[in-house]
Amino acid sequence: MTESANRIFSGIQPTGNLHLGNYLGAIRNWVTLQDDFESIYCVVDLHAVTVPQDPAQLRNSTREVTASLIASGISPERSILFNQSRVPQHAQLAWIFNCVARLGWLNRMTQFKEKAGKNREQASVGLYSYPILMAADILTYKATHVPVGEDQKQHLELTRDIAQAFNSHYEVDCFPLPEPQIFGSATRVMSLRDGSSKMSKSDMSELSRINLTDDNDTIAAKIRKAKTDADALPSEAAGLAGRPEAENLVGIYAAMASMTVDDVLREFGGRGFGDFKPALAALAVDQLAPIGARMRELLENPDELDAILDDGAVRAEAIARPILAEVHEIVGFLGMPVK
């Protein structure tokens, strides 16, 4: 079945070291989406090679991210879980979209400017055009909804522009205009060493983030060493203004405990971090330790992970192939029958 009024697609890069920010900001919400959507989740290894990758590390990271998703609650039975390069329709549709999108659209993409930095002329063409591949990822399945964070909204807008341009040019109603799926509960997790910077796997300091692979002692130690200020916690959220590290830790506690920030501060307001950090560490260990344990178990059986990705790719291609065949027919290509 190629059509669905309730299909969601999302992808994550296989760069390894998934951390608490990835979990609270995205993965945990992907788990809940399985209840309401036909869910397709992809480890986007084609996107990963827009920058140089060590082949062996890329394979390992693909398995590690797959294990992270499963350990966090993504079900390979309820959802479709695969790595992008196994389904050739992504790259094939991306080429057609390369011929639909306009340079001016890509020139407005702010992430390329941020990632390329001062070495723009040395950046790969793939890094420049990867928002088009992202559009193909989504529209290969005619996904109707896409969970997005603030940094991806612009790319989803480009996807909608490409879908609309294709439909208009060929005078068809082929592609839906996917809607953003934005969560009020998505948490922007900041560095444990700098409350003004996002928690990132690229940060040189291991103390800046809690990795999903960290053991109990490491999680507790990182929270204990997290940067704070000398003041006690306030009794209401307004009192966190100008205190980024305090705001970050309270926000993490609220997200993990499924509480509001005000609820957390009603409990801990007036108390110092000497009381708050042990409570946060206990909560983090309680939630993350089972994920880490399940990840380690899965990673000890790489053949099992590969079989899961194989099965997911077969199911994904069963949706993608007839959609691409439809696109070929619209464009005027010969020789791609629908199986």
Image (cartoon, rainbow, N blue to C red):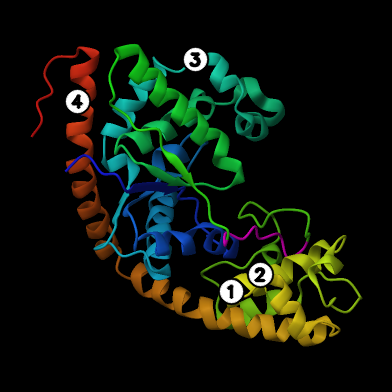
Location of residue 17 in the rendering, given as x and y in whole percent from the top left corner: 53, 60
Asked if the residue at tag 1 contacts the one at tag 4, i.e. Cβ–Cβ closer than 8 Å, the answer is no
Q: Is residue 242 above or below residue 132?
A: below
* Magenta highlight: main SS: loop
Real-space Cα separation, disc 1 to disc 2, in angstroms: 6 Å
In the displayed structure, would residue 268 be above or below residue 105? below
Q: Which residue in the structure is indicated by mark 2?
A: 252
First to last magenta residue range: 185-193
Q: Amino acid at mark 3?
A: Arg
Tag 2: amino acid = Ile
Determine contact: label 4, label 3, CB under 8 Å.
no
Q: What percent of the width, then of the height, locates residue 77?
A: 24, 63
SS class, disc 3 = loop
Q: Which mark is residue 256?
A: 1
Report whether 132 appears left or right of 95: right
Which residue is located at x 29 percent, y 26 percent? 92
Residue denoted by label 4: 326
CB contact under 8 Å: marks 1 and 2: yes
